[in-house]
Image: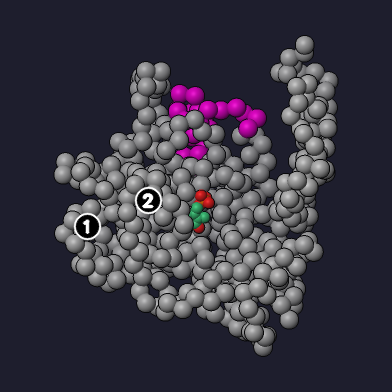
Amino acid sequence: MKSMHALDIETVEMTFDIMKYAINRISNTEPELGHPKKETDLMKMVGETITKEGIGGEKAFELFRDVLAKATVPVDHPRHLAFVPAAPTRAAILFDLVTSAASVHGAYWMTGAGGIFCENQAMKWLVSLTGLPEKAFGVFTSGGTAANLSAMITAREYWRELNDENKAYKGLIITSSGAHSSIKSMANVIDADLILVDDDDEDRLTGEWLQKKINQLSFTDRKRLFAVVATGGTTNAGIIDDLESVADVCEKEKLWFHVDAAYGGGALAAPSVRHLFNGIERADSITIDPHKWLFSPYDCGAIIYKNIELAKNAHSQKGAYLDIFKDEGAQGFNPADYQIQLTRRLRGLPLWFSLAMHGTEKYAQAIERGLELAQIAAEKIKTRDYLELIRDPGLSCVLFKRKGWQPDDYIDWTYTNHQAGFALVTPTKWTKNGHSETAARFCFINPDTNEKDIEEILVTMQ
Ligand SMILES: *Cc1c(COP(=O)(O)O)cnc(C)c1O
């Protein structure tokens, strides 16, 4: 039997087919907006694909390209304004292909040095956006969830090592109700309790409300409290907590200060809104997702620490077969030491290539465009009498209502536009002063979205 690693004619032909597809897809400015189908329907169209003899590369690729890919939603479609969309640069996507082709193990300097050097160059720029002091550095993760988890573990280990007594307690973290669902999930993973603080207006975490909550804690709960998680741009509304006053309280109370800027972090590069993040330079750790607003392909998150050595204490894995990495000859920056994952691809490489090619100013410009699109959308909403703007845009998030619509109407609107292959726009809930209502939401990331796209989507709500 022929080996599947053999470089034969079939493989060469398949390479050309796949490269042709990749080139077409990467140069496509308006990809088809696919939608999901039921698994039973996909099965009818495709059949069983894993067989003893294999169905052949040509057939498998054809099924993917002509059937299965059409049952997916491209995140870079200019009228995909739901959740947090994405718009990886062509340079970054191309280099994602290179990252796979280069076959580098990115956990340790010994095997990944040249690639980790590139990742670190990109990381240096990210760290510089935060204003953290000299010693701060970070590492790329699979996403915001993994970054938040890595930070929370580092914080907990630091706290436990401060005092033996702390080892007996279940940890406690304070965050706001606007915090991302991953904060709640990851607190569960590390078996810590979570308390939500919000002020009574828009759930924006402030030092004043944080202090009030801390003062109300029981003696034991105060002992258990080890970290505060603020958000640098809530996923729902783009709200940035009052990082300066929260930092004051964390310093005074000696608490780990984590800022989750998975979505909003890209806006640190945008001069027009940078001041809204003041105080972030006092954080102990910061999450930023390059796969959201820094135009990297999935998946690429980042965790940055004020003192990266603390992360090493928490994350460095030990094993007889890993001892070689402690040897002089293999010394260097080991990404595996600073987050939860051991074996990893060089997922910061696409960002590095795109940054190196385009320069940082183009990044600032593309992010500013997302902010501008949100302002343009808000103005258009204000001039239409059947619509109501709920609040001024938070970063690139716009929340608004269609007067007279019930929750079901928003859902119908979403499906109608999606089924037509026209746009993906979804409703959300907005809560203010304890009152919750359904709203339409836009989140702008893609600088190729234009005014006409916005206009045409608003028309569908008439
Ligand atoms: C998206 C998001 C996350 C989760 O990031 P993933 O990359 O999806 O794991 C965490 N926090 C915030 C604020 C986010 O917007």
Report the magenta residues as a range: 100-122
- Marks 1 and 2 sit apart, C-alpha to C-alpha, by 16 Å
Residue 10, by quadrant, is: top right
Residue 111: in magenta span: yes
Dominant SS of magenta comes to helix
Q: Kindly identify the amino acid type of the residue bearing the numbered disc 1.
A: Asp
The crowd level at tag 1 (other Cα within 10 Å; few <14, some 14-19, many 20+) is: some
Residue 34, by quadrant, is: bottom right
Q: In the drawing, does residue 14 fall left or right of residue 436?
A: right
Q: How far across and how far down the image is residue 415, in percent?
A: 72, 65
If the image is split into quadrants, where does the N terminus sit? top right
Residue 158: in magenta span: no
Q: In the drawing, does residue 352 fall left or right of residue 338?
A: right
Mark positioned earlier in the residue sequence (1 or 2): 2
Q: Which mark is residue 221?
A: 1
Q: How far across and how far down the image is residue 227, in percent?
A: 29, 54
Q: In the drawing, does residue 404 fall left or right of residue 149?
A: right
Q: How far across and how far down the image is residue 426, in percent?
A: 64, 66
The residue at which mark 2 appears reads as: 187
In the image shown, does 107 or 409 lie closer to the viewer? Answer: 409
Picture residue at 76% right of the left edge, 26% below the top:
51
Q: Residue furthest bottom?
A: 385
- Residue 126 in view of the camera: no
